[in-house]
Amino acid sequence: MIHQDETMLNITNKMFSDAARRESETPIGTASVKDLDEFLVLLNHIFTTVTPEFTICLNDATSSLDPCGLIGFPINALLDWPMATSSGYVVFSNALINQQFKKI
């Protein structure tokens, strides 16, 4: 759908390039998604093979093992930085894009 709409493709490409420029600001220094094609491959992987995971750490106060670290749905790793750009706001505010996400 995006590949057939030149305007949407351009704004989507800008979203990923804007997010990549902010890579040094990420809390764990991880690489960002580079482009739409990589995003779609990773999104497919998340929905077809990945199960949510978390890390267990020793809680010093209670001496118990508790979930710790970055806890969230795997899709958050794909969406957080692209959505934080002005281009991302345009992309993820688009009704057609949201219709596609609702299908998932």
Image (cartoon, rainbow, N blue to C red):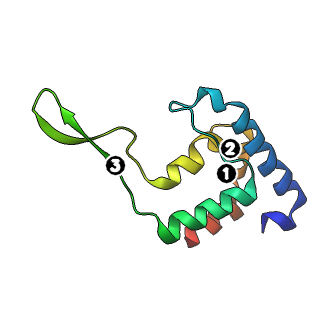
- Mark 1 touches mark 2? (CB < 8 Å): yes
Q: Quadrant of residue 63?
A: top left
Q: Position of residue 19 (x, y in %)?
A: 69, 38
Position of residue 76 relative to residue 98, above or below, is above
- The foreground one among 58 and 84 is 58
Q: Residue at x 40, y 63 (%)?
A: 51
Q: Quadrant of residue 59?
A: top left
Residue position marked by numbered label 2 in the rendering: 89
Q: Position of residue 11 (x, y in %)?
A: 81, 48
Q: Which mark is residue 54?
A: 3
Q: Which mark is residue 49?
A: none
Determine whether the residue tagged by mark 3 lies in a helix, strand or loop. Answer: loop
Q: Position of residue 69 (x, y in %)?
A: 36, 38
Determine whether the residue tagged by mark 2 lies in a helix, strand or loop. Answer: helix
Horizontally, is 57 left or right of 93 in the view?
A: left
Q: Residue at x 51, y 49 (%)?
A: 76
Residue position marked by numbered label 1 in the rendering: 93
Q: Residue at x 63, y 40 (%)?
A: 31
Q: Quadrant of residue 68?
A: top left
- Mark 1 touches mark 3? (CB < 8 Å): no
Work out whether mark 1 precedes mark 3 in sequence or the reverse, and give the earlier one.
3
Position of residue 44 relative to residue 88, above or below, is below
Determine whether the residue tagged by mark 1 lies in a helix, strand or loop. Answer: helix
Amino acid under disc 3: Phe
